Amino acid sequence: MNLEVKIGKMTMKNPVTTASGTFGYGSEYAEFVDLNLLGAVTVKGISLEPREGNPPPRIYETPCGMLNSIGLQNVGLKNFLDEKLPYLKGFDTRIIVNILGNTIDEYCELSSALDGKVDAIELNVSCPNVKKGGVLFSNNNDMLRTLIKEVRTTVKTSTVIVKLSPASADIVMQARICEEVGIDAVSMINTIPAMAIDIHSRRPRLSNIIGGLSGPAIRPIGVRMVWETHRAINIPIIAMGGIMTAEDAMEYILAGATAVAIGTANFVKPTVTLDIIEGMKKYMLIHGIDDINSLIGGLIC
Ligand SMILES: Cc1cc2nc3c(=O)[nH]c(=O)nc-3n(C[C@H](O)[C@H](O)[C@H](O)COP(=O)(O)O)c2cc1C
């Protein structure tokens, strides 16, 4: 049975990775999950300098999901390269590093420092461009194109993935732009901006007021977006958004995903990634499928 998939130059032994920000730097989960069994580990978004993130409360459980406004807390590039990366390199798995910046130069500096040292660089483009009045890169197609073109030119060895936001006006168009400038793959979907209110105190549930919604509540939106995007582009898609079980993962593969990332589910059950890999194998066995690649985009309409 073949579970191996290819994302750009990166070959994954199976299609399952972790969604950035929900699996720390891998070490936090190593007690529960044999990292060698994962197709890839995707780490928390890294910025040039360490960030403290937003003050609490910064997570809030909602029906079938959660809101978070962590504020991109992370150890910064230097600590990542000195401490976190050497640890991850000790495992037989692919390493995907999610990066974030507030200027194109920051993204390029991060990309060039990571190029060749990690298997793939995933750009979180849902960040404000401080040089353009704080407009999110993902909210402006011209800005997005300029950013990813620059990063594309900077990175020579690692696979480049752009993580798309479901809050952008046209996610399919943005995936097309990624393909046009030579990006290797897209990942989707990031969280959906949302909020909740404590009606008794009349205060927002999150200190940042607005947070990102994740979990099963967003899965049907993710599946629809992956399906629409798969029909429009030829580069691979790493799908995420509410995957809790192998059945959910298969839904995304049939919609057109080459690989899947598990996010919020890790908070519910730390070993869920392994259950999902086993469940995918079972599905293939039951349906007589010997290569997972033959199921990608296999939806029958
Ligand atoms: C607590 C938390 C932190 C996250 N941090 C990041 C991040 O640093 N960079 C990023 O691109 N996405 C981040 N995300 C978004 C996830 O990677 C993923 O796209 C989203 O949660 C949808 O998947 P899920 O429903 O399986 O969680 C974060 C999500 C959560 C819940």
Image (spheres, rainbow, N blue to C red):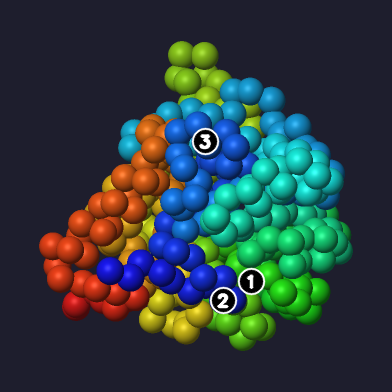
Q: Residue at x 59, y 76 (%)?
A: 9
Amino acid type at mark 3: Tyr
Badge 2 density bin: few <14, some 14–19, many ≥20, Cα 10 Å? some
Question: Percent position (x, y) of residue 148?
Answer: 71, 72
Above or below, 106 relative to 294: above
Outermost residue, top side: 200
Tag 2 near tag 1, CB within 8 Å: yes
Frontmost residue, 90 versus 111? 90
Q: Is residue 254 above or below residue 136?
A: below
**Mark 3 lies on residue:** 29
Q: Residue 39: horizontal and vertical position, in percent?
A: 47, 58
- What residue sits right under mark 1 in the picture? 159
Q: Residue at x 17, y 63 (%)?
A: 285
Q: Which residue is mark 2?
A: 8
Label 2 – label 1 distance at C-alpha: 6 Å
Residue 120 picture quarter: bottom right
